[in-house]
């Protein structure tokens, strides 16, 4: 019933041009509100508080506040605008120039090697199976750009092409009827953007944009720096506000309401953002998206194999450090600055060899 009502609303929006216009305008309301809120916080903190410290109360403390505040503001809004303006990456986009989907900072080994070594070394259980610089080792082997592939090595060290392992529950390949395009692994269709988003996390109304492969890092940095920003302005404004509140009745009457609202709003947004930051940090280190953490996954190893359904088997978890680098980039000095791109092409992914071999063995046992 709910699904039919939703599809009916989508059909009505497609036929009504004026409704589409209003819907697009409405999508920008959270963005305008957030920018206005940050602009007001700048006025309340810099003009109403720091200027008072510089001119009357304590110039040194005012300078310290300004020196600490502005880098936080720049990093937060820089990350915000990049996450808002940069495309998350769509399945219909042409492949990124110069990208082969390999992760050059990670060491890759064969499945059979990992099967034998995983019992001896627990660290190996997080090692990915994905061929680094495949073209240099076998120039005759090419990965078609139109077919997302995950590259592994067989027991002889030769490249083996494994098609997209995520399928429908029926075992059929994932295909988007609306986009009329194959859906690579970890790709989902966004009803708001009306496109299939590579490694889609969720659609964020505060950014009026999807969070996906190409802007995942910037979104993560925004909520991290946003959390620090909110708590900084809150705790920096709290002492003078308490001091005024404990003074005479005349001092309380003259208390700047901008300070009070800054503490209230900064505290509320800070508490909300820290929850998001902790949650997305856990997803980052486990190499999951919000959608992947909430849904079951259907895997199919062979064309004639059975479908394995699991909510907890995450084949893309290649170890905390490798997971982190995959999103934040290989250069540590760019990790917390909105510069650089995530590793890969958003279509093919390195796999956890231990979990992959476990899945293969489970499929083999089912077919016996």
Image (cartoon, grey):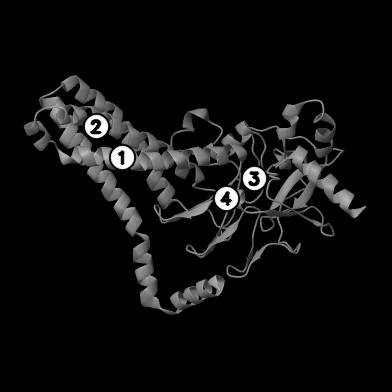
Is residue 93 shown left or right of residue 55? right
Quadrant in the picture for the N terminus: bottom right
Q: Which residue is mark 4?
A: 96
Going from the N terminus, do you reach mark 4 or mark 3 first?
A: 4
Q: Which residue is mark 3?
A: 101
> Could one spot residue 88 in this view of the protein?
no
Label 3 to label 2: alpha-carbon separation = 47 Å
Q: Please state the horizontal and vertical placement of residue 182, each as a whole percent of the image.
A: 65, 62
Q: Please state the horizontal and vertical placement of residue 119, each as a whole percent of the image.
A: 82, 29
Going from the N terminus, do you reach mark 4 or mark 1 first?
A: 4
Is residue 108 shown left or right of residue 264? right
Q: Which residue is mark 1?
A: 266
Query: Mark 4 against mark 2, which lies toward the viewer?
Result: 2
Camera-nearest residue between 317 and 263: 263
Label 4 to label 3: alpha-carbon separation = 9 Å
Q: Please state the horizontal and vertical placement of residue 49, each as a whole percent of the image.
A: 18, 33
Label 4 to label 2: alpha-carbon separation = 46 Å
Please tell me whether mark 2 sits on a helix, a strand or a loop.
Answer: helix
- Estimate how packed mark 1 is, as few (under 14), some (14 to 19) or many (20 or more) residues with alpha carbons within 10 Å: many
Res 261 → quadrant = top left
Q: Is residue 283 above or below residue 69?
A: below
Looking at the image, the residue that sits furthest to the right is 368
Q: Residue at x 61, y 31 (%)?
A: 321
């Amino acid at each position: 019933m709910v699904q039919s009502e939703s599809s009916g609303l989508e059909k009505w929006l497609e036929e009504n041009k004026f409704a589409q216009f209003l819907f697009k305008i409405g999508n920008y309301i959270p963005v305008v509100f957030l920018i206005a809120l940050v602009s007001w916080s700048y006025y309340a903190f810099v003009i109403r508080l720091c200027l008072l410290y510089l001119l009357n109360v304590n110039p040194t403390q005012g300078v310290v506040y300004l020196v600490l505040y502005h880098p936080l503001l720049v990093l937060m809004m820089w990350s915000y605008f990049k996450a808002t303006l940069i495309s998350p990456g769509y399945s219909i986009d042409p492949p990124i120039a110069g990208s082969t989907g390999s992760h050059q900072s990670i060491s890759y080994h064969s499945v059979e090697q990992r099967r034998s070594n995983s019992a001896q070394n627990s660290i190996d259980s997080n090692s990915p199976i994905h061929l680094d610089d495949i073209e240099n080792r076998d120039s005759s082997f090419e990965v078609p750009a139109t077919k997302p592939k995950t590259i592994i090595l067989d027991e002889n060290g030769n490249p083996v092409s494994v098609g997209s392992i995520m399928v429908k529950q029926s075992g059929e390949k994932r295909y988007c009827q609306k986009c009329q395009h194959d859906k690579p692994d970890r790709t989902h269709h966004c009803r708001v953007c009306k496109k299939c988003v590579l490694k889609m996390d969720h659609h964020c109304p505060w950014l009026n944009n999807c969070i996906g492969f190409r802007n995942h890092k910037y979104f993560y940095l925004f909520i991290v720096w946003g959390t620090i920003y909110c708590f900084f302005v809150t705790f920096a404004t709290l002492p003078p506000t308490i001091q005024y509140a404990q003074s005479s009745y005349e001092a309380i009457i003259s208390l700047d309401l901008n300070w009070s609202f800054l503490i209230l709003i900064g505290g509320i947004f800070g508490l909300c953002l820290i929850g998001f930051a902790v949650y997305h940090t856990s997803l980052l280190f486990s190499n999951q998206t919000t959608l992947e953490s909430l849904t079951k996954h259907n895997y199919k190893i062979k064309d004639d194999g059975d479908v394995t359904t699991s909510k907890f088997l995450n084949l893309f978890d290649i170890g905390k450090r490798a997971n982190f680098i995959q999103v934040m980039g290989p250069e540590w000095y760019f990790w917390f600055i909105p510069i650089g791109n995530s590793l890969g092409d958003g279509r093919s992914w390195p796999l956890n060899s231990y979990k992959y071999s476990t899945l293969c063995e489970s499929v083999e046992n089912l077919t016996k």
